[in-house]
Image (tube, rainbow, N blue to C red):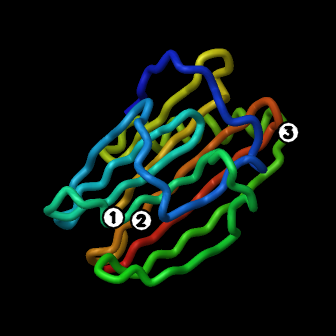
Amino acid sequence: MRASISAPFVDTQADDLVWSLNHPVVEPLATRTVTVSGRRVELRVLGASHQVVIRSGSDDGELVETVACLPGSSGGLPGNAEHPLPGVGHYRFGSVVESLPRAALTRRVAEVHDVTSDSPGGLLVAFPGDPLAITALHLTSGSGASLRWRTWHAYPQSDEMVTTTTTLTP
């Protein structure tokens, strides 16, 4: 699903992003909700950042993954992180930041469009002003009851692509 928005591209570069599992839910620019294995998964685009919110039958958030420019936060993204989350499952996160020539960034953004456009678990936002300024999320089912999602944040002003991969195993 491609969402149309009028909000400007906010983040400036990959180094400004931080990762959190305890940031409050933020009002999104675009959302896609998918139910997988009895869990409601909200894919949310915030500015040029994202949140993935996973809820069970109640309205209490079980998991809130945030990758964003968070005021007062620093440290960047971890290459890899693993956390047991009581009552939720085992959480694994990985991120890669790539500096790409413009042609390669253009090609990668086109690939992300292809992966997410017709997928029931895809959400892509292209920001006004530059067709390469995108944030996209793609939820796929993992093995068994596990959940897996990937995200992409493209920064055309610095020719960077941030890719994250997360797996949640109950």
- Amino acid found under the numbered disc labelled 3: Pro
Residue 145 screen position, x and y as percent: 27, 75
Look at mark 2 in the image and give the residue it sits on: 148
- Is 89 positioned to the left or the right of 97 in the image? left
- Is 31 positioned to the left or the right of 51 in the image? left
Q: Is residue 120 above or below residue 65?
A: above
- Amino acid found under the numbered disc labelled 1: Ser
Look at mark 3 in the image and give the residue it sits on: 101
Q: Tell me the element at label 2.
A: strand
Q: For marks 1 and 3, give the CA distance.
A: 32 Å
- Is 101 positioned to the left or the right of 70 in the image? right
Q: Tell me the element at label 3.
A: loop
Residue 157 screen position, x and y as percent: 80, 30
| Mark whose residue sits in front, 2 or 3 | 2
Q: Residues within 10 Å of mark 2 (few under 14, many from 20)?
A: some
User: Which mark sits nearer the N-terminus, 1 or 2?
Assistant: 1
- Look at the numbered discs 1 and 3 and tell me whether their residues touch, using CB distance below 8 Å: no
Look at mark 1 in the image and give the residue it sits on: 141
Seen at 33% across and 49% down, the residue is 42
For residue 8, which quarter of the picture? top right
Seen at 28% across and 77% down, the residue is 144
Q: For marks 2 and 3, give the CA distance.
A: 29 Å
